[in-house]
Image (cartoon, helix red, strand yellow):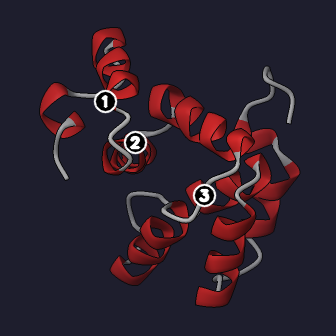
Amino acid sequence: MCRNQQPSQHPGARWTAEGRMTLQEFTQCGQRGSQDDVVILMNQLDEAVDLPTRKNVDYALGLVREREGVEMLHWYLNNGRVIQRNYAALYFIRREMFEVIREAVELGSIDPLQAWAR
């Protein structure tokens, strides 16, 4: 994905609209951990998403290790919808990447109280 391209314009975003993902698909996305996979996972999140989907996204994001996937999570931390920023913050907090969180708070991307919630 180009750095200037919005995730909603990404072809992977259209894939998520085709139906619900299985746990195996969530797991595969997390294990691959590419930019596309992070976009697919984050596009599962909206304000009306059910609890099982939220848990599956949280689990799958925890599997992301590829540099490009982590960079995409950093993008969501600063530019995503509120729910996406919260899940991205959880990712960095769980990895004790506190400087990333501090920068997001200083930029006003995330609320200081929410930033440090686990």
Residue ID for mark 1:
98
Q: Quadrant of residue 14?
A: bottom right
Residue at left offset 46%, top offset 72%: 59
98 is higher (above) or lower (below) than 19: above
Residue type at mark 2: give it. Answer: Phe
| Label whose residue precedes the other's in the sequence (1 or 2) | 2
Label of residue 32 in the image: none
| 109 or 18, nearer to the observer | 109
Q: Quadrant of residue 73?
A: top right
Q: For the image shown, how many numbered marks are present on the structure?
A: 3
Task: Quote the CA–CA distance across marks 2 and 3.
Answer: 11 Å
Query: CB under 8 Å between callouts 1 and 2?
Result: yes
Task: Quote the CA–CA distance across marks 1 and 2.
Answer: 7 Å
Residue ID for mark 2:
92
For label 2, the crowd category at 10 Å Cα-Cα, with few meaning under 14, some 14 to 19 and many 20 or more, is many
Residue ID for mark 3:
64
Secondary structure category for the residue under label 2? helix
Secondary structure category for the residue under label 3? loop
41 is higher (above) or lower (below) than 56: above
Query: CB under 8 Å between callouts 2 and 3?
Result: no
Residue type at mark 3: give it. Answer: Val
| Label whose residue precedes the other's in the sequence (2 or 3) | 3
- Residue 31: x and y in percent read 68, 69
Secondary structure category for the residue under label 1? helix
| Label whose residue precedes the other's in the sequence (3 or 1) | 3
Q: Tell me if 42 is positioned left or right of 97 in this view.
A: right
Residue at left offset 28%, top offset 19%: 105
